[in-house]
Image (cartoon, rainbow, N blue to C red):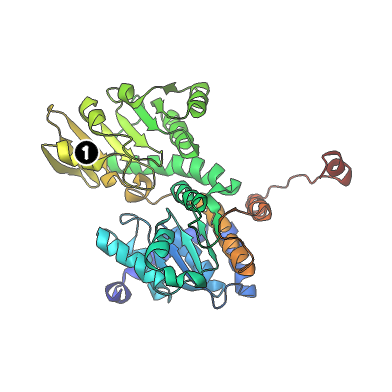
Amino acid sequence: MSEIRDSSLWRSGKTKIDWVIGHMPILNSIEKEFVAEKPLKGVKVALSVHLEAKTAYLCEVFAAGGAEMYVTGSNVLSTQDDVAAALVHDGLNVFAWHGATKDEYEHHLSSVLEAGPNVIVDDGGDLVHLMHTAYVPLIPSVYGGCEETTTGVLRLIGMARENTLKFPMVLVNNADCKHLFDNRYGTGQSVWDGINRTTNLIVAGKNVVVAGYGWCGKGVAMRAKGLGADVIVTEVNPIRAMEAVMDGFKVMAMDMAAPLGDIFVTVTGCCQVICERHFLAMKEGAICCNAGHFDVEVSMKDLDRIALSSYEARNNIRGYRLPNGRTVFVLGEGKLVNLACGDGHPAEIMDMSFGIQALSVRYIVRNRGKLPATVLNVPEEIDLDVAHRRLAAWGIEIDDLTDEQAGYLGM
């Protein structure tokens, strides 16, 4: 913390934050409301989200609403030190730096929880999990929280099913203004931003294997097709597999796709999606990367175990020489490629996602003590509010139902 606080890095981070502020009109409008209302006055917010410029602006919006902020990242390679420094300079409590070790990362998570937060904003579920295992005595002070991503939602649903979740958690990821846009268009663009800037290779004419055809996988496959790739989709869900076929993609098992792919992108939220037998079947020079939250989809343990040697081929690219004489490459250590190798989702996309976050946190604070200790959907009025703000920023007007129409529809 002292090194960041004393560093001139904050000026660089402030420039990045100022840039995204100019492209996030939804948060702009919410910030004005928060400044006037101070809905979070006296509220401690613990936040663990990829710590870059868009997230920093969300933190500043919370602070503008009166919140006392305790901030860390949700991935050791996605934290941008200059952005973290800018938040420290503005008086926020930040516990994060780029390239933290596993122990350091866990210490950072612990540090934000030791503040005794009232609201938790999580990305992947690490904060909530740690609160329920190591900080149980602090749980009564938690009004509730929000979860940003699919992986975290799945973890929370499991906790709720087992009746181990001790406070309400709003599933921000499941809001239409989040997953329909962030997961599809945000992931679709930012994954290829990360791959292209890191490899400096052409995508057109290559075989791209996309593992998983959820909303994120749809976006990655769509953008790969737009860049001129031949796209292969692998899936475990037969309905999603049918969707991929009808969207014009080849669908096959990973065992069949492994020898064909030039670039592999995992977007499943599961583990061992690409493992030992797949690496050994890959062609010379195949490139693997992961767009799921945790670094378990491309099995780095398998690759480290079977590789005869490894080397840094280029910044954020590591080559692994296999016993069969071939070399495969992994981007960003198998962590989130769009953040480990890039700047994450575009500002306009995160504007919608973080708009949902900001309004959901206000909803939690306004309804503290009234919400059940389980997983909750984002209230429809919040989802629609964000959509209307986005359309207004575009200068787009839409129709309203007349009373007759509403009656006809039974509304």
Q: Residue at x 59, y 58 (%)?
A: 26
Percent coordinates x, y for residue 387 in the rendering:
64, 50
Instruction: Classify 326 as above or below 303.
Output: above
Please state if 202 lies on the left or on the right of 116 as rendered.
Answer: left
Percent coordinates x, y for residue 70 in the rendering:
43, 71
Percent coordinates x, y for residue 83 in the rendering:
38, 64
Residue placed most toward the observer, 223 or 142: 142
Residue placed most toward the observer, 245 or 275: 275
Please state if 322 lies on the left or on the right of 380 as rendered.
Answer: left
Q: Is residue 38 visible?
A: yes
The amino acid on which the numbered mark 1 sits, given as a three-letter code, is: Asp
Hey, which residue is sitting farthest right in the picture?
Answer: 404
Assign the C terminus to one quadrant of the image.
Answer: top right
Instruction: Classify 209 as above or below 378.
Output: above
Total residue callouts: 1
Q: Residue at x 41, y 58 (%)?
A: 129
Q: Residue at x 32, y 50 (%)?
A: 340
